[in-house]
């Protein structure tokens, strides 16, 4: 395998509240975060679209933005995450969930999610990627 692989990343932010039942520290009380979500995608062949409106692109940034907004951001922004998800709302569980949802929704566009980073604070993030 030689040559280059071209990946694109788009970043999003959302504000949400949550609490972690049974947490030994202060995260058991309700509090909020400004989360930052970074979504990196790549085409199956690592190359660019060769024809049409998206020639020279991995995916149109506006399409990526619309999908992530519809499938993730609009479901969590200004919400109480404990009411949105049935799993414990750690950044790890949420990042894994977002990875799965976006992988499904982006598949028709010929791209796969290479990596997701979910920042719970500016200096703490979770990274999820496919295990080859
Ligand atoms: Zn928290």
Image (spheres, rainbow, N blue to C red):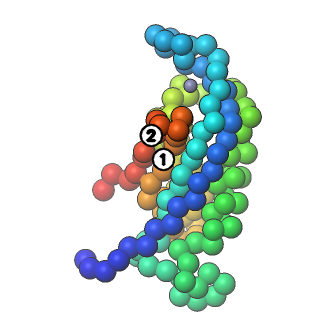
User: Residue lying farthest front?
Assistant: 123
**Residue 95: x and y, percent?**
51, 41
Mark yes or no: residue 84 visible.
no
User: Residue lying farthest bottom?
Assistant: 51
Dot label at residue 56 = none
Report whether 60 appears left or right of 121.
right
Number of callouts: 2
Dot label at residue 117 = 1
Mark yes or no: residue 83 visible.
yes
**Residue 41: x and y, percent?**
49, 63
Q: Quadrant of the C terminus?
A: bottom left
Which residue is located at x 63 percent, y 63 percent? 64
Is 85 placed above or below 110 here? above
What is the secondary structure assignment of the residue under circle 1? strand
Mark 2 and mark 1 in contact? Answer it, CB < 8 Å: yes
**Residue 34: x and y, percent?**
63, 36
Which residue is located at x 61 percent, y 13 percent? 29
Q: Residues within 10 Å of mark 1 (few under 14, many from 20)?
A: many
Ligand 1 falls in which quarter?
top right
Is 87 placed above or below 74 here? above
Quarter-of-image position of residue 106: bottom right
Which residue is located at x 43 percent, y 73 percent? 6
**Residue 9: x and y, percent?**
53, 61
Report whether 40 appears left or right of 109.
left
Which residue is located at x 53 percent, y 25 percent? 88
What is the secondary structure assignment of the residue under circle 2? strand
Quarter-of-image position of residue 68: bottom right
Which residue has dot 2 on it? 126
């Amino acid at each position: 395998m030689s040559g280059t692989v071209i990946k694109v990343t788009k970043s999003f932010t959302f504000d949400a509240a949550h609490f972690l039942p049974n947490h030994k520290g202060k995260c058991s009380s309700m509090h909020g975060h400004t989360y930052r979500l970074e979504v990196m995608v790549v085409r199956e062949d690592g190359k660019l679209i060769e024809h049409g409106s998206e020639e020279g692109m991995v995916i149109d940034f506006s399409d990526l933005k619309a999908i992530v907004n519809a499938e993730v951001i609009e479901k969590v922004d200004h919400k109480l995450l404990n009411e949105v998800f049935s799993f414990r709302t750690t950044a790890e569980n949420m990042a894994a969930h977002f990875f799965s949802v976006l992988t499904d929704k982006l598949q028709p566009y010929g791209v796969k999610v290479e990596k997701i980073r979910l920042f719970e604070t500016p200096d703490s993030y979770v990274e999820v990627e496919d295990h080859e």
